[in-house]
């Protein structure tokens, strides 16, 4: 079924072409892409509008004059064309051709498609196609190092990666979610060295200490940092350990294996708690040798060169320009001792991934601190001659801090992910108890956990990825503001309205004629919001930015609240049962859009709250 938007668009297109012919304007047929449809800034201007700017040049006329003529001719055509007339009323406002849609017809059309598409509503564009159908998109996110636990920055990363993946899927793409575990390198050796110094003799393990594995290994890392300040030679010892590791030294590898599995168990526990799921884990230890091979091949081909100190490098002047320092335009790929660096493994990992699951796009969700790294990485892969380099995309996101200041893990003042969620959980539980809801919500502890996650993820996703941000825990938990818990509250409220109506024998209507009764102002505003869902999905998918989805859901919640204030449901039933049932259907459609949308921004739905 064509939407009102498409009908309006094609009517405008016809009228513009008509105008061209009547005025004998000598230019090719108007391309339909030139006809844009927007939402006018104020509802009294109309429901849809189309700007005439794109035609000014070819018609040699000012846009308002074109708009006036086009609107006039649409009005005239409507006199003889019933289906055009039933679409709504055309008018010109400045450079725009606007339409006030026929509410009754639009309301039935929109609600009918929500009801018939059910859970799939939102996936189809106006031509009835899924916009990303046939696209294979790999999304890499989280990607921690194994020397410390997840911190607040990872929570933003995880929220973005998971949300973007769900949105891409909703838009029709086949999505493959991967996590890169950086389990090799000097950082791990530092934790290992501290373990040997302070814990090995006592045979301490996370279990014996009653700690999460990642927290314990993270503690070792902090211990190393302190120790190395008084014993600078420790850094060299760690470097020697890395060389031994690369040589496959049995003892070093044994300890490495043990400590990495402690960390990984801990990380997985956090993923489970936050609802983050991966299709595959990539381990640096598996891919770095492939990276090394590629570097050696590139050295032979002359893409890289051997520096006087024995390290292998690439000249990146093309990417960064000539710096002040002698070799700032050179990037080391293999150290002089032959060990590989961070970017080496990324070269191997990218190649393995393209072999494992040939993709149309690979999205790296990684902090903006690594913009330079990814520029160089893509440059190197291109130089090595891989044709798919164009398909790589760095989804860069800004810093996130608590209001109290920046986190620095080396000093042990990191905002730990688990601790933060624990504290949100405790505050949510307290709020539930204070509101006297602990008996009516079911299991207060489970509900508090879901409220905590909603607060966290919504707050993190409601800001465009590129922006730096502060995470304010109190604000995120507020039940009446632009927050995750507010969306949950609105969802639970609608569920309760539907439950109570049912108890009184009132079920939502499924009749298109009944839907056409929904023409009151706040009904109309809500219906128009629901109509926008598919285009919001599409836009969020194309921009890889969930923040538009988050604010959309807030709009829907506010519109529902206004509708419920203005339009009684059960209260009307005795006078006008059809209207009451149509309003219930609108409530049900709102809940269904809200639920799908909440899932896309990781806000768990709660039946009762
Ligand atoms: N583990 C790295 C870090 O914590 C991030 C990895 C990002 N992904 C990548 N393919 N390089 O800084």
Image: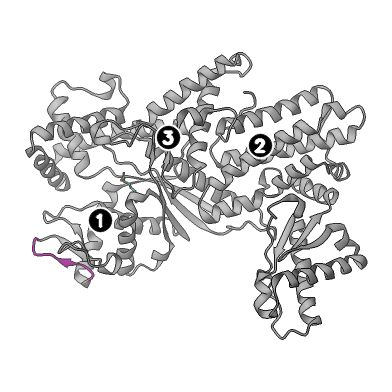
Left or right relative to 64: residue 157: left
Please state the horizontal and vertical placement of residue 456, each as a whole percent of the image: 48, 33
Q: Is residue 352 above or below residue 57?
A: above
Magenta includes 367?
A: no
The tag on residue 344 is 1
Secondary structure at numbered mark 1: helix
Q: Position of residue 545 (x, y in %)?
A: 51, 50
Tag 3 residue: 271
- Which residue is at 82% across, 61% downward? 90
Viewer can see residue 384:
no
Secondary structure at numbered mark 3: helix
Q: Locate residue 593: give its quadrant.
A: top right
User: Secondary structure beneath disc 2?
Assistant: helix
- Magenta-highlighted residues: 303-309
* Distance from Cα at disc 2 to Cα at disc 3: 29 Å
Residue, disc 2 = 557
Q: Which mark is nearer the camera, 2 or 3?
A: 2
Crowding at dot 1, Cα within 10 Å, few <14 / some 14-19 / many 20+, comes out as many
Image location of residue 402, percent across then percent down: 39, 33
Find the distance from the CA under tag 1 to the CA under tag 2.
48 Å
Dominant secondary structure of the residues highlighted in magenta in the image: loop
Badge 2 density bin: few <14, some 14–19, many ≥20, Cα 10 Å:
many
Callout 3: 10 Å neighbours few (<14), some, many (20+)?
some
């Amino acid at each position: 079924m064509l939407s009102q938007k498409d009908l309006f668009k094609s009517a405008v297109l016809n009228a513009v072409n008509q105008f061209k012919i009547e005025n004998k304007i000598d230019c090719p047929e108007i391309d339909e892409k030139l006809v844009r449809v927007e939402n006018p800034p104020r509802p009294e201007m109309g429901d849809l509008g189309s700007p005439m700017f794109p035609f000014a040049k070819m018609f040699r006329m000012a846009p308002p004059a074109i708009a006036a003529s086009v609107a006039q001719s649409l009005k005239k055509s409507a006199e003889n064309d019933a289906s055009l007339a039933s679409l709504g009323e055309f008018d010109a406002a400045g450079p725009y051709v606007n339409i006030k849609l026929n509410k009754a017809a639009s309301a039935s059309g929109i609600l009918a498609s929500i009801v018939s598409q059910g859970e799939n509503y939102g996936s189809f564009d106006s031509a009835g196609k899924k916009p990303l159908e046939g696209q294979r998109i790999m999304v890499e996110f989280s990607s921690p190092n194994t020397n410390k636990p997840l911190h607040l920055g990872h929570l933003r990363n995880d929220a973005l990666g998971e949300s973007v993946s769900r949105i891409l899927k909703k838009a029709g793409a086949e999505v493959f979610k991967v996590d890169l575990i950086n389990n090799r390198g000097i950082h791990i050796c530092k934790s290992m060295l501290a373990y040997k110094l302070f814990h090995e003799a006592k045979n301490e393990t996370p279990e014996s200490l009653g700690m999460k594995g990642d927290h314990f290994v993270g503690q070792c890392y902090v211990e190393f940092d302190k120790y190395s300040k008084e014993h600078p030679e420790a850094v060299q010892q760690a470097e020697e350990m890395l060389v031994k590791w690369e040589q496959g030294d049995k003892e070093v590898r044994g300890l490495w294996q043990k400590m990495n599995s402690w960390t990984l168990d801990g990380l997985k526990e956090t993923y489970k708690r936050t609802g983050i799921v991966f299709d595959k884990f990539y381990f640096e230890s598996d891919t770095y040798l492939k990276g090394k091979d590629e570097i050696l091949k590139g050295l032979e081909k002359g893409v890289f060169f051997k520096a006087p100190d024995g390290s292998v490098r690439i000249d990146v002047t093309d990417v960064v320009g000539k710096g002040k320092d002698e070799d700032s335009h050179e990037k080391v790929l293999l150290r002089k001792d032959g060990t590989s660096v961070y970017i080496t493994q990324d070269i191997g990992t990218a190649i393995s991934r393209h072999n494992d699951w040939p993709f149309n796009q690979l999205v790296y969700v990684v902090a903006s601190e690594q913009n330079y790294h990814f520029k160089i990485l893509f440059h190197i892969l291109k130089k090595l001659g891989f044709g798919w380099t164009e398909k790589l995309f760095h989804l860069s996101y800004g810093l996130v801090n608590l209001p109290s200041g920046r986190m620095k893990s080396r000093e042990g003042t990191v905002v730990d992910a688990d601790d933060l969620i624990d504290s949100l959980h405790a505050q949510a539980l307290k709020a539930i108890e204070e509101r006297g809801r602990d008996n009516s919500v079911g299991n207060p502890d489970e509900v508090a956990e879901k409220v905590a996650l909603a607060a966290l993820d919504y707050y993190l996703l409601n800001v465009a990825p590129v922006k730096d941000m502060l995470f304010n825990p109190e604000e995120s938990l507020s039940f009446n503001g632009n927050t995750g818990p507010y969306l949950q509250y609105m969802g639970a409220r609608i569920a309760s309205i539907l439950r109570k109506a049912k108890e009184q024998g009132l079920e939502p209507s499924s009749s298109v004629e009944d839907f056409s009764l929904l023409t009151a102002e706040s009904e109309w505003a809500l219906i128009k919001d629901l109509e926008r869902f598919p285009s919001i999905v599409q836009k969020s998918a194309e921009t890889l930015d969930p923040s538009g989805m988050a604010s959309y859901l807030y709009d829907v919640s506010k519109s529902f609240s206004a509708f419920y204030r203005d339009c009684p449901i059960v209260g009307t039933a005795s006078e006008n049962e059809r209207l009451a049932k149509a309003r219930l259907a609108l409530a049900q459609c709102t809940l269904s859009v809200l639920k799908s949308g909440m899932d896309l921004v990781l806000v768990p739905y709660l039946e009762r709250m």
